[in-house]
Image: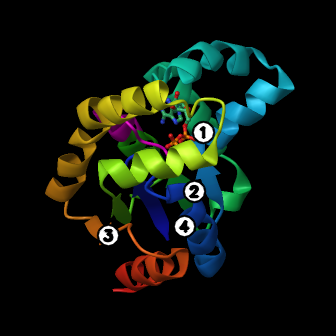
Amino acid sequence: MRLVLVGPPGAGKGTQAEFISAHFAIPHISTGDIFRANLSAGTPLGLEAKGYMDKGDLVPDSLTTAMVKDRLQQGDVANGFLLDGFPRTTGQAEALDGILREINTPLEVVLEMQADEDEIVGRLLARGRSDDSEEVIRHRLKVYAEQTAPIISYYKNSGILRTINGLGSVAEVTERAISALSR
Ligand code: ADP
């Protein structure tokens, strides 16, 4: 299964991604996690990404796309993958299509997780990551609406979009996700 999870920050993508990747035995690839790992290792990529992440801005497409292309060339994605947090712009979505076309393995499903803004802000404040101050959260939500939400119509047009409600207990949402993906 070649799958993308999309939804606003705080919709629960990372949590559900763990369950979904275990269920389908595919690697969970989170661009946010890869950036944070580079940051703690002090790599040039991490240092470059830091300024954007701290402000809640997107890291430029060129950097992000090159990083994902590299990741998708590793052997463990032969049976599929779950991308979490990528693509986040239409440019990234087009680049991903290009990368997958080259290896003749098109994307199969894009799962959209919906959650309303008040719930999201509450969850992110409770999470308390360093880029989770209320001001940065509001900015990330604005960036989501402006730059990421357009990829939802992009995938709707290509007929691979499935949408679930991200509110409820973790187990309830996992059940919705697995059943939406098993249809
Ligand atoms: P969230 O939990 O808010 O969805 P992530 O862990 O997915 O956050 O990402 C944290 C930060 O990493 C983002 O605010 C952004 O700066 C950067 N980032 C992650 N994925 C991407 C991407 N696909 N394109 C650009 N920037 C990204």
Residue in the foreground of this view, choosing between 150 and 65: 150
Find disc 2 in the rendering and name its residue.
Answer: 14
Bin the neighbour count of mark 1 within 10 Å (Cα to Cα): few under 14, some 14-19, many 20 and up.
Answer: some
Label 4 to label 2: alpha-carbon separation? 6 Å
- State yes or no: Cβ of the residue under disc 1 lies below 8 Å from any atom of ligand 1: yes
In the rendered image, the quadrant that contains the C terminus is bottom left
Find disc 1 in the rendering and name its residue.
Answer: 32
Q: Return the mark for residue 165.
A: 3
- Mark 4 in CB contact with mark 2 (< 8 angstroms): yes
- Mark 3 in CB contact with mark 4 (< 8 angstroms): no
Circle 4 sits in a helix, a strand or a loop, which is it?
helix
Find disc 4 in the rendering and name its residue.
Answer: 16
- Mark 3 in CB contact with mark 2 (< 8 angstroms): no
Label 2 to label 1: alpha-carbon separation? 10 Å
Q: Say what amino acid the circle numbered 1 marks.
A: Gly
Q: Could you say where residue 81 lies in the image, as x and y percent from the top left?
A: 57, 61
Circle 1 sits in a helix, a strand or a loop, which is it?
helix
Label 3 to label 1: alpha-carbon separation? 22 Å
Residue in the foreground of this view, choosing between 15 and 162: 15
Bin the neighbour count of mark 4 within 10 Å (Cα to Cα): few under 14, some 14-19, many 20 and up.
Answer: many
Q: Could you say where residue 176 lies in the image, as x and y percent from the top left?
A: 40, 81
Bin the neighbour count of mark 2 within 10 Å (Cα to Cα): few under 14, some 14-19, many 20 and up.
Answer: some
Q: Earlier in the sequence, mark 3 or mark 4?
A: 4
Q: Say what amino acid the circle numbered 3 marks.
A: Asn
Q: How many labels does the image show?
A: 4
